[in-house]
Structures are given as C-alpha cells and as structure tokens.
C-alpha cells in the first residue's frame, strides 16, 4: 500500500501505491482516465506541489502544509499531535463511534489486500469510484474516515458529533456536495465540497486556521 507524504519543508516518504480495476458497474470515469493527480498548497506555503497518478491526496493546511497520499504510513508527522496515518485513523474511528450507535464500516469496494486497514480501503475506494456512485454505502464513510484522520491530529474536543452529522443526520446533503457543490455547518466545522473533493474547516481555531482537503482523482485541481 502506498504513501507519498510531502510537506513544504521538503519532507517526503514513499511506500508504493497499489490500485485495481473497478467492477464494470462503475467502470465509467475510472481514475486511470486522469493521467496525474495534483495536490497544491493554497494557504500555508503556497505553491508547494505534489503529484501522483490516480491517487487520493489528503492535504492539511494550518501553519504548515502536509500532503499525504495513500493511508498506511506508520511514520509520525510534524503537524498537530504528530500521529502517523495508521495511528490517527485507528483512534478517530474509535472516536467517531464513541457514545453513539454508529457502526462505521469501510468495505473494500474495489480489490484490496486482505490485510488492508479501514483507512487503506477508504483511500483505494476514493481513488477508483467516480462521483456518480458516491451514494454507495461505504463511500461517504471513506471520505469521513480520511478527513477525520487529519482532523484528529488537531482535535481539541470530541469529533463523534461530526461523524453523526456526515453519516446519518446530514448524509444526503453530504453526498450532494461531494458529487456537485455546496456547504453546511456542523458546530464549529464548515463542511464544503465540490465534485470529488471534500473540504472541512475548523472555524474555532481562528488564530491558526485549520483546513483539511480530501482530493480524489475526479476533482478539479483548481477547486480543491
């Protein structure tokens, strides 16, 4: 499973990204149709760029800019509490389900290794499944887990209410903004999206704005 981790300080970690063919039912608009996906820092360290063919980039912008490809890294990062992708994804999955009756499952909607973690399955799902199929159970969960992994590093309070909104009470609206365009508020979080792109801003951290972007190969680089 692959990861390229890139910061504006020129830190990079690469592990090898593996992808597989989607089933014929969602064969239109495959990620392979996009030659190279592009992540670009827009707030902190503007202009820093990282690219990978057919991958999902999670970009965290606060005082610095962290770009992460894939979801299986065990290396600590220099942002927030420093948790690796693997550790942060495990902890946020527990937090998302704490004190409510949500049971978040990330199915392998495309071929994945038997040992793939939920976050690795989420990354593979979003790298291959086009927006027309975003109402498939497991796709909104994949977006939520990847964005939650990044948010958890900066969390100053609970995040379970965010999961409840995205995956239950405002699920239909969540799917609409991921397919098309729009935004809504969940407590201190501004949840925005456009085709193939999710953006969450924590507006409680005004002295050091925090924005997390989940960019799939189906997103328009200039809008994500």
Image (spheres, rainbow, N blue to C red):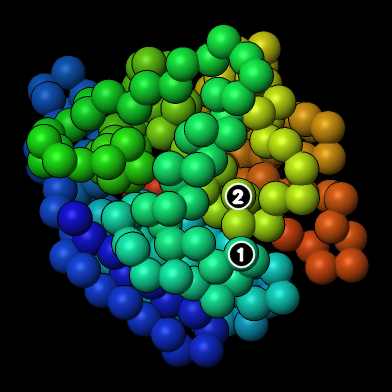
Cβ–Cβ under 8 Å for marks 1 and 2? yes
- The residue that disc 1 covers is 81
Image coords of residue 80 (percent x, y): 64, 66
Q: Secondary structure at mark 2?
A: helix
Query: Quadrant location of residue 169?
Result: top right
| Residue at figure coordinates x 11%, y 23% from the top left | 24
Whether residue 156 is situated above or below residue 100 in the rendered picture: below
Image coords of residue 114 (percent x, y): 11, 36
Query: Quadrant location of residue 60?
Result: bottom right
Residue 219 at least partly seen = no
Image coords of residue 101 (percent x, y): 57, 10
Query: Quadrant location of residue 120?
Result: top left
Q: Secondary structure at mark 1?
A: loop
Quarter that holds the N terminus: bottom left
Whether residue 64 is situated above or below residue 206 in the rendered picture: below
Task: Answer with left or right where residue 171 lies relative to residue 186.
Answer: left
- The residue that disc 2 covers is 152
| Residue at figure coordinates x 87%, y 50% from the top left | 204
Quarter that holds the C terminus: bottom right
Image coords of residue 138 (percent x, y): 37, 22
Whether residue 32 is situated above or below residue 196 in the rendered picture: below
């Amino acid at each position: 499973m692959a990861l390229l981790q890139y910061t504006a300080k020129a830190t990079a970690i690469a592990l090898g990204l593996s992808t597989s063919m989607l089933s014929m039912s969602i064969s239109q608009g495959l990620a392979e149709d996009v030659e190279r996906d592009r992540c670009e820092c827009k707030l902190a360290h503007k202009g820093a760029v990282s690219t990978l063919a057919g991958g999902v980039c999670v970009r965290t912008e606060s005082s610095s800019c962290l770009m992460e490809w894939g979801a299986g890294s065990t290396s600590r990062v220099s942002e927030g509490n420093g948790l690796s992708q693997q550790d942060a994804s495990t902890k946020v999955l527990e937090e998302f389900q704490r004190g409510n009756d949500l049971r978040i499952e990330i199915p392998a909607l495309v071929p994945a290794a038997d040992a793939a973690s939920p976050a690795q399955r989420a990354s593979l799902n979003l790298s291959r499944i086009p927006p027309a199929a975003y109402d498939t159970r497991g796709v909104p969960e994949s977006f939520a887990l990847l964005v939650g992994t990044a948010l958890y590093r900066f969390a100053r309070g609970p995040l379970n209410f965010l999961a409840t909104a995205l995956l239950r009470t405002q699920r239909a609206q969540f799917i609409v903004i991921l397919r098309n365009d729009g935004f809504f508020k969940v407590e201190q979080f501004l949840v925005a999206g456009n085709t193939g792109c999710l953006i969450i801003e924590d507006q409680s951290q005004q002295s050091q704005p925090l924005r997390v972007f989940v960019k799939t190969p189906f997103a328009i680089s200039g809008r994500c």
